[in-house]
Image (cartoon, rainbow, N blue to C red):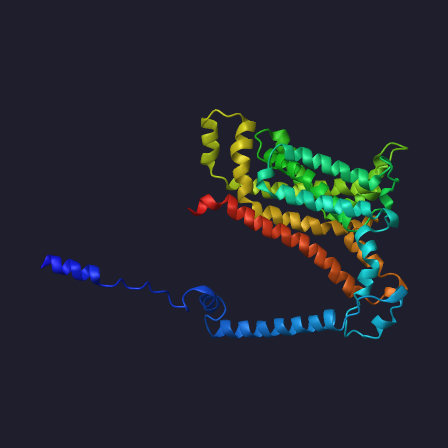
Amino acid sequence: MSDITLNATAAAPEAAPRSPPISQVGLLAWLRANLFSGWLSTLVTLALAYLIIRWAAGFVEWGILNAVWSVPNNQTQACRDLKGIGACWAVVTEKHRFILFGTYPFEEHWRPALCILLFIGLYVVSAMRRFWRKELAFVWAGVLALIGVLMWGGVLGLPYVPQERWGGLVITLILATFGLAFAFPLAILVALGRRSKLPAIKAICVLYVELIRGVPLISLLFMASVMFPLFLPEGMNIDKLLRAQIAIILFAGAYLAEVVRGGLQALPKGQYEAADALGLSYWQKTGFIILPQALRLVIPPLVNTFIGFFKDTSLVLIIGIFDLLTAGKTAIIEPAWQGFGIEVYVTVGAIYFVFCFAMSKYSQGLEAELNRHRRR
């Protein structure tokens, strides 16, 4: 009897695997859960979809279908004949060199263009974890020194170009890169100083943070440009760009210090006690155990601060430095191109968006990778 049962079971065909209902998984399930979960959600989704489609159709019609892309010899009549129904991208094609490079000598534009590529390459290399070694610091030093040689010149047969001729995107990248590269180590030292048990060090760090955070960046730039030279010895002068760079470093360092201090405070006390139990020195405990975990906790606010200061470099306008946004504003001062500022601002905004969006997406990936163990 048992043999017959076994044979019948073996001869029975296996049931085919059943797939889950299409309404429970995949795109349809996501749409149902997030966009059409109820009548109110459906109504809001349809209203927003209508507005987005209408705006996109209008932008395509204005920015592509009816747009003017070039005009001969600054003859902008073709753009003015549009009367607002189409974009005049000719102002961008005509003024793109000024927007990107400012008043840098025309025949030497290859130098700031190469500097922009070096900056982007440095960002890409620094974003790859396999290059996170001590040698990366030497790469940064070498690339930044090369950028300085290319911009100033005066050596290797390159004509000298004073800082007053610099401008555009390269100035924005210089201020943001040098500013954050020096502000981040300063912020770590200040954050550690605020948690120090030595009263003098703690008081100095607290005073620095509260004083810098208590004034806007514009006031620091104004002081660096106008008031700081008054305290220098007679005959001594510091480059205007360097003064602005120092102001940005000090300002960014104060804000980043508070972000880092938040990560230090969020770390469980047991991590400090475990490091002390291992007999590690203060700097060994801080460098190998405390800081890596603290910085991992505050990746989102750190990158948010980076993005904010990348955009805040446009405030150097107040001391007469032509960054990307200022160069864009100046490009449309010429009477022939007045009235076409929207196209320039859209282009400048797109450049800012590309850099900021890249930082945001990279931080999301880095945070997910470094905190993978927390989800186990």
Residue at 77%, 65% in the rendered image: 342
Q: Is residue 197 left or right of residue 309?
A: left
Q: Which sits in the foreground, 77 or 373?
A: 77
Image height of 46 relative to 253, above or below: below
Q: Is residue 80 above or below residue 1?
A: below
> Residue 147 location, x and y as percent?
77, 40
Looking at the rendering, in which quadrant would you find the N terminus? bottom left
Residue drawn at 44 percent across, 47 percent down: 375
Asked if one can make out residue 208 in the rendered structure from this viewpoint, the answer is yes
Q: Residue at x 89, y 68 (%)?
A: 75
On the image, the x and y values in percent for residue 252 come to: 68, 43
**Relative to the observer, which residue lies in front, 240 or 36?**
36
Q: Quadrant of residue 292?
A: top right
Q: Position of residue 293 (x, y in %)?
A: 52, 39
User: In the figure, 340 relative to 39: above or below?
Assistant: above
Give the camera-side residue of 114 and 178: 114
Quarter-wise, where is residue 94 in the image?
bottom right
